[in-house]
Amino acid sequence: MNTNSSNMMALAPKTPNKRETVCIFGTGDFGRALGHKMIQCGYPVVYGSRSTQITNLIPKDAEVLSHAEAAQKAAIIIIAIQRQHYNFLIPLAEILHGKVVVDISNNLKLNQYPESNAEYLARLLPGARVVKAFNTVSAWALQSGALDASRQVFVCGDDMEAKQMVMDIVRALGLTPLDQGSLLAAQEIENYPLQLFPMWKFPVFLSLGLTAFFFFYCLALDIVYTYIYENRNFSFFIALTIPNRICPVVALILLGLVYLPGVLAAIIQLYRGTKYRRFPDWLDKWMLCRKQLGLLALAFASLHAVFTLVSPMRAFVKWRTSKAIVSQALNNKTEPLDTTNAWLSDSYLALGIIGFFFFVLVGITSLPSVSNSVNWREFRFVQSKLGYLTLILCTAHTLVYGGKWFLSPSAYKWYLPNIYMLSLVVPCAVLVVKFVLIFPCVDKPLTQIRQGWERNPKYSE
Ligand code: NAP
């Protein structure tokens, strides 16, 4: 068997008009979809299979040979076979020596094996140049033209040239290769398709928890309390009034929680006098999911805006308005316009509208398609400066709305504060600390620390 001629192919320069033959082991779902796509893009494809019979499922123009014969025809061999069958490759080790062997496999569970499938393959075939790629692309996405799925293909491997050859194929297929480094990254790449919105878990559970807590809080104060002490049945509040109370409260708390880790990190850095020590794990994780917290906050704020807009259509609001008019008519007395109240209501509406506008702006800028088109300084300006402006406006909106009731005993049913008062705790705390942090006597050392200055340097010059 002449292995040398096939090994030479790995390094042979590409002719501009003809693409190199690619060998795919396995004629299963992925092998067929990938082969089909490659043939479309001009690659001659040869399959290595346990059965050399050509069925009508195999892409037209592809050859099907035994594994050994197919491997000799190409410099790149893609293994479209599950990891548990990799043992069959051991007798082929000599033929695969010096060839680029691409591992595309996935597992059923996170960290299912102590070593990644690609490292296992490299151990089975010590002479092969193993590259990990394609595992995050599905057979379906390849067949449907990958237009409505992620185009990113994570690639890793220890042999730079082999990796480059695979990345060229990825590009030729209309996909985007992302070099992830050496084969050590394979385990992480193999875990990607198994993760279910990892950054969203904490923000989603937190917002669901807050929603549930405030729902029962409102249920007790707005419905049960009124029923017991005023004998009035306001159970219909569950449909719209209570959701419209919960949404702004959860939105404001979540928005506060987006900026709270930043101020906590600043306090920690000031206290330690260095930026070269890791933050606690919980703070690191919290900082990583700020975008998700912010987007959920925006979703709750949008719901609040919609609920508020439809409010005048509600039977209860119409009844209350007509009752007030009839009562004035019966008493033959027109109530004078309370200009203080008018100022307050116009102001809180204006603050809410402008706050919501900036909220949407900050939310849009966090989308990858937009954030990729601005530079780091512009991104920081929007996310930090405009973000804080949004927090100030939304907090002011809530304060102006309910501030006048803060000292009124009727606002404390069962001695409990109304929920809009609770919603102010986190954002007010963040704004107060941030205000202190921008004082020059605090800001200056903090900026120095962030530029690398240390109070007690470990390595003095
Ligand atoms: P599949 O449809 O079950 O095909 C696997 C192929 O492996 C079979 O058609 C068979 O090909 C070959 N095979 C099965 N048992 C074998 C054995 N004992 N020895 C040698 N070859 C054997 O699986 P698939 O969906 O194509 O997935 C193949 C690999 O791609 C897996 O590692 C999977 O994790 C990965 N992957 C799949 C997708 C996807 O969307 N399906 C996406 C990313 C990655 P022959 O009959 O031709 O020998």
Image (tube, helix red, strand yellow):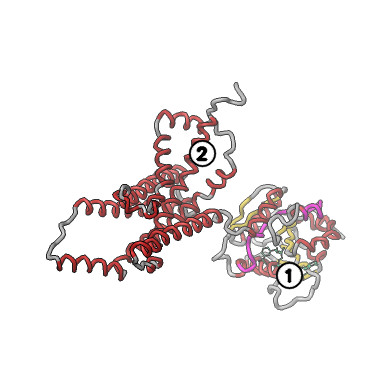
Q: Which quadrant: the C terminus?
A: top right
In the depicted view, which residue is nearer to us: 408 or 74?
408
State the separation of the CA atoms marked 1 and 2.
53 Å
Q: Residue at x 26, y 69 (%)?
A: 319
Pointer 1 with pointer 2, Cβ within 8 A: no
Q: Earlier in the sequence, mark 1 or mark 2?
A: 1
Q: Is residue 373 left or right of residue 30?
A: left
**Rendered image quadrant of residue 112:** bottom right
Residue 306 in sight here:
no
Residue 206 in sight here:
yes
Looking at the rendering, the stretch of residues picked out in magenta corresponds to: 120-140
Q: Residue at x 79, y 58 (%)?
A: 6
Disc 1 CB within 8 Å of nearest ligand 1 atom: yes
Dot 2: within a 10 Å radius of its alpha carbon, few (fewer than 14), some, or many (20 or more) residues? Answer: some
Number of numbered discs visible in the structure rendering: 2
Residue 420, numbered circle: none
Query: Which residue is denoted by mark 2 in the rendering?
Result: 265
Q: Position of residue 368 (x, y in %)?
A: 49, 54
Ligand 1 resides in the quarter of the picture at bottom right
Give the amino acid type for the residue marked by disc 2 in the picture: Ala
In the depicted view, which residue is nearer to us: 269 or 369?
269
Q: Position of residue 113 (x, y in %)?
A: 75, 55
